[in-house]
Image (cartoon, rainbow, N blue to C red):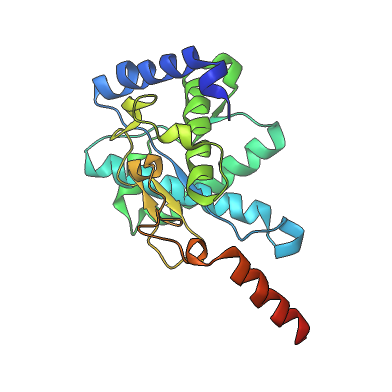
């Protein structure tokens, strides 16, 4: 939460990298996130592996759609985890790409099976980690009423992120009555799930003494 105060230089470097490495060369940033039901995986019966696999498949779909729309080919590079997980994920992702390509030609834009690279050996993956960190804080701001990461929405701090995300970027909300959050909307200060109240709140219009009297009457009647 105190990143702007403790590490302002890192925010400036990140913003400059987004501008010089991505925006100035016609590139785009991308994110995809699924909001899960509140509670621990055990409490809500969440299959973590299935959740991750579904998110990865949706990520591939959206990246391929963006590449196809702009007439580009695409290589997917993923941060290395461990050998067992790498083998499982590569097989699953390749199967998804191959099985979907017949009905969705955009999948053919992915020219190679996704590759895993150790982040310590790749500046690209390290940069992606920075993007993920910024996106994670923006997601927290959008979903958490008591979030301490409102600073990530300050256009003076991360100006280059505005408009730099693909249209296909999405925060998929869970069982909400509002639309999902797309592209740079994620970094808006206004929160779709907790809009700024206009006018006077009901609670501020009630006299505290009257409220206490009403509470006593309610307790006496229980």
- When the figure is inspected, residue 32 is found, relative to residue 46, above or below; the finding is above
Image coordinates of residue 192 in percent, x first then y, are: 40, 55
Q: Residue at x 43, y 68 (%)?
A: 177
Image coordinates of residue 152 in percent, x first then y, are: 45, 32
Question: Would residue 117 be found to the left or right of residue 48 on screen?
Answer: left
Does the rendering let one see residue 77? no
* In-front residue for pair 23/51: 23
Q: Quadrant of the C terminus?
A: bottom right
Number of labels in the image equals 0
* In-front residue for pair 156/74: 156
Question: Would residue 42 be found to the left or right of residue 201 on screen?
Answer: right
Image coordinates of residue 75 in percent, x first then y, are: 40, 32
- When the figure is inspected, residue 51 is found, relative to residue 111, above or below; the finding is below
Q: Residue at x 52, y 67 (%)?
A: 206
- When the figure is inspected, residue 194 is found, relative to residue 187, above or below; the finding is below
Q: Quadrant of residue 27?
A: top left
Q: Residue furthest front?
A: 209
Image coordinates of residue 67 in percent, x first then y, are: 29, 39
* In-front residue for pair 25/207: 207
Q: Residue furthest bottom?
A: 221
């Amino acid at each position: 939460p105190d990143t702007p105060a403790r590490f302002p230089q890192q925010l400036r470097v990140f913003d400059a990298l987004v501008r010089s490495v991505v925006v100035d060369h016609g590139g785009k940033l991308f994110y995809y996130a699924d909001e899960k039901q509140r509670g621990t995986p055990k409490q809500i019966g969440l299959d973590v592996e299935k959740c991750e696999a579904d998110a990865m498949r949706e990520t591939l779909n959206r990246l391929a759609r963006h590449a196809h729309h702009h007439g580009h080919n695409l290589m997917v590079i993923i941060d290395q985890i461990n050998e067992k997980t790498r083998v499982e994920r590569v097989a699953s992702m390749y199967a998804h790409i191959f099985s979907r390509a017949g009905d969705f030609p955009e999948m053919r834009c992915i020219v190679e099976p996704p590759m895993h690279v150790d982040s310590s050996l790749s500046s690209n993956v390290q940069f992606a980690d920075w993007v993920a960190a910024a996106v994670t804080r923006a997601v927290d701001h959008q979903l958490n009423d008591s979030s301490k990461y409102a600073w990530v929405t300050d256009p003076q701090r991360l100006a280059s992120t505005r408009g730099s995300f693909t249209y296909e970027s999405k925060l998929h909300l869970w069982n909400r009555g509002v639309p999902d959050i797309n592209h740079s909307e994620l970094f808006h200060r206004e929160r779709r799930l907790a809009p700024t109240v206009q006018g006077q709140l009901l609670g501020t219009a009630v006299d505290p003494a009257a409220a206490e009297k009403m509470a006593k009457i309610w307790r006496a009647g229980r």
